[in-house]
Amino acid sequence: MRDLRKDYVLDKFVLVPSSSSVPDAEEKPDKCPYCPGNESLTPPALLALVVQDGMLQRLSDSEDSVVEDWSVRVFDSKAPVVTTAAAASYSEKPLYSEPAYGYHQVVVATPDHKQTLPQMSVEQWSNVLVVIQDRVRWLYTQKGVTYVSIYVNSGQSAGSKVVHPHLDMVTFSSIPPTIELEAEGFHRFMNENGKCPACNMISVESSGPRQILATDSFLSICPWAPTYSYEYWIYPKRHVTSFSKITQKEISDLALMLRATLGGMSKALKDAPFNLVFHLSPEKKNSRQIHWHIEVYPQMSAWSGLERGFGVYVNNVRPEKAAEVLGSACRKELAGLVGIT
C-alpha cells in the first residue's frame, strides 16, 4: 500500500510506500506471468477479449476456469501504485497526505511475448483500443474515480519492469497536476479566443513542417516546444474530449496511426525506449475539459539539473528535424501496412 503525499507548497503529489507496502513484483526470467499458460501467476482476468470467427467476445475468468486463447487480457496489478483497500487516513498541512485510493489494472496487449507494441498488427491494436475503451467506461462508473490515467512504459529506462507488451491503467480520486495545468491552459485560451486551442493547433500544424502523418481522423505532429527529443503527439481531428465516445471507425483509424507511427519511430530511433500516455478529460461533470490526445516520449537521453531542478528543458533536436526523420519512416511504415509499394 502507498500514501499520496502533497508537496509543502506546490500542487505536486508523490506516491510513497506505507509501512505495510510490499516490494514491486518483478518478471521471472524463466516464466513470464503475462504469457498464455501462466495465467495462474496473475490475478483473475477482469476482461479477456477472445476473437472467434471474426467476432469479439468479452469474457472473464471464474473461480473454476481461466479464459484461454485470449487476444487481450486485463487484470488487477499485483504491485499496484493505488488500491481500493487503502486505509482512510489523512494528515494535516504542511505534512498533508491522503489515501492512495484507486484501481490499477494491467492490459496485456498481445499473447505473443516476443512481439513489441511497434510490431503489433493494426487489428491487434484495434482490439487493445476496444478493451481500453471498455475499461475506461467501467472505471468511470466506480465510486472515488475522478480520473483514469493510461500509459505505456516500454523499455527499462522508460520504467518497464516486465518485457511482455502491456499498458497500465491507474485511477485517481483527484485530477493529476499535469492534466489540471493543461485544462487550465485550455480554459484560458477558450475564454480569450473563443475556440479550442487544440483545434487551432491542428489547423496550424496540418501539412506544416512538424506534421508526421495524417489519416482520415487523426493527425500526428512533433510539437512546437517538445520536452523530449523526437516527442510526438496524436490528436483526433474531430473536437472530442472523451476517448470513450470515439466511434469504431475512429478506433480502427487510430490503430493504423499508432501502428504506423510507433513502427516508424522504432525503426528510425533503433528501438529506443519510450513512454506513451493518453491525456483525457475527466468524464464526471467538471469544467476541466481538454481535447483528448496521445503523447509519445522517446527516452533518448538523461535529464540534467536544469530540467530536474528548474523545469527548463534542453532539446538537442529541432522538432522540424524530428518530424522530417519520423515522417519519412512513418510514411514508409504506413505504405507497407496498406499495401502500397
Image (cartoon, helix red, strand yellow):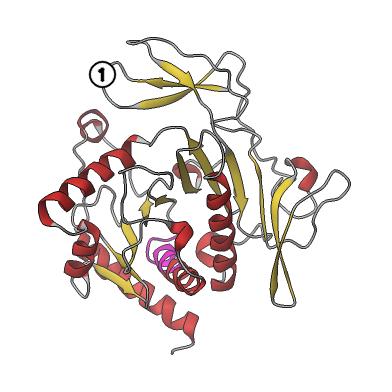
As drawn, the residue found furthest toward the left would be 192
Name which residue lies at 73% across and 40% down.
Answer: 43
- Looking at the picture, does residue 297 appear above or below residue 121? above
Give the percent coordinates (x, y) of residue 191.
14, 50
Give the percent coordinates (x, y) of residue 217.
37, 73
Give the percent coordinates (x, y) of residue 19.
58, 13
Name which residue lies at 50% across and 38% down.
Answer: 171
- Whether residue 162 is visible to the viewer of this picture, yes or no, is no
- Looking at the picture, does residue 142 appear above or below residue 299? above
Residue kind at label 1, given as amino acid type: Val
Q: Could you say whether the residue bearing mark 1 is in a helix, strand or loop?
A: loop
As drawn, the residue found furthest toward the right would be 64
Name which residue lies at 52% across and 40% down.
Answer: 170
Q: Which quadrant holds residue 130?
A: bottom right
Give the residue number, with chain letter if any, for mark 1: 9
Main SS class of the magenta portion in the image: helix
Give the percent coordinates (x, y) of residue 229.
28, 53
Image position of 220 (left or right of 29): left
- Whether residue 308 is visible to the viewer of this picture, yes or no, is yes
As drawn, the residue found furthest toward the front would be 285
Question: Magenta residues?
Answer: 261-271
> Of residues 25 and 108, which is closer to you in this image?
108
Q: Is residue 138 magenta?
A: no
- Looking at the picture, does residue 137 appear above or below residue 268? above
> Of residues 120 and 206, which is closer to you in this image?
206
Q: Quadrant of the N terminus?
A: top right
Q: Is residue 270 magenta?
A: yes
| Mark 1 residue crowding within 10 angstroms, few (<14) / some (14–19) / many (20+) | few
Image position of 79 (left or right of 10): right
Q: Which quadrant holds residue 266?
A: bottom left
Q: Quadrant of the C terminus?
A: bottom left
Image position of 69 (left or right of 305): right
